Amino acid sequence: MARQILFIQGGGAGTHDHWDNKLVESLLRALGDGYELRYPRMPGEDDPIQVAWSAAVRRELAELPDGAVVVGHSVGATILIQALAEQPPECSLAAIVLIAAPFVGPGGWPSAEFELPQNLGTRLPHGVAVHVFHGLRDETVPPSHADLYAEAIPQALLHRLPGLDHQLNNDLSEVARAIGSSP
């Protein structure tokens, strides 16, 4: 049976079809056989609203089988991790992967809609590998946000990638290696 991966897109006009689709294609290519990837279109991708995206993420999480991997890019990663901390899924996850995620809270970006909980790491599903990937040439989300996630989620494995941008240069081979090493 193929391992399920849920990929939550980033925000912005055309992101699903013209930006993050390249990330999905790269990830599938790098993973090879044995994986099935779900890539839902988030509501109002041009202007992500946390409440609407959180509801959509929770619906997707409810459909996952045990052993699934969840991946989020940019604002999609931020909303994914917030949704997981607020209400862990019923299934057991193999891994949580954040790519170029903006940190919302002290030291990161302010938001009128929400802030990540201070005890973020303890609120995530126990025993699940958490990977934080960030390109050091990211001009959209400062790489320092990855350090804020590492502080908020002490169990997270931080992957600082030299020479890569916000889209990790459309090369998710490092992400695929982390997913492939998940139990």
Image: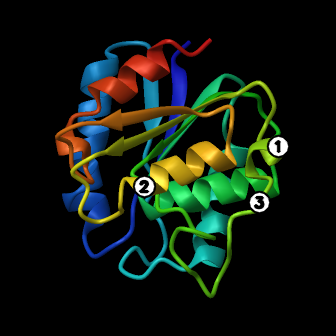
**Tag 3 residue:** 118
Q: Nearer the viewer, residue 86 or 56?
A: 86
> For the point 22% across and 57% down, which residue is it?
19
Earlier sequence position, callout 1 versus callout 2:
1
> For the point 81% across and 31% down, which residue is it?
126
Q: Position of residue 173 (x, y in %)?
A: 28, 25
Q: Nearer the viewer, residue 131 or 20?
A: 131
The answer to the question of whether label 2 and label 3 lie on touching residues, with beta carbons closer than 8 A, is no
Q: Does residue 134 lie above or below 68 as drawn?
A: below
Q: Position of residue 125 (x, y in %)?
A: 79, 37
> For the point 82% across and 54% down, which residue is it?
87
Residue farthest to the bottom, as pictured: 112
Earlier sequence position, callout 2 versus callout 3:
3
Amino acid type indicated by mark 2 = Ser
Q: CA distance from mark 2 to mark 3?
A: 17 Å
SS class of the residue under badge 3?
Answer: loop
Q: Which mark is residue 144?
A: 2
Amino acid type indicated by mark 1 = Thr
Q: Position of residue 32 (x, y in %)?
A: 31, 15
Q: Nearer the viewer, mark 1 or mark 2?
A: 2
Q: CA distance from mark 1 to mark 2?
A: 21 Å
The reply, left or right, for residue 109 in relation to residue 156 is left
SS class of the residue under badge 2?
Answer: helix
Q: Which mark is residue 69?
A: none
**Tag 1 residue:** 122
Q: Position of residue 151 (x, y in %)?
A: 63, 46
Q: Quadrant of the N terminus?
A: top right
Q: Quadrant of the C terminus?
A: top right
Quarter-of-image position of residue 110: bottom right
Quarter-of-image position of residue 93: top right
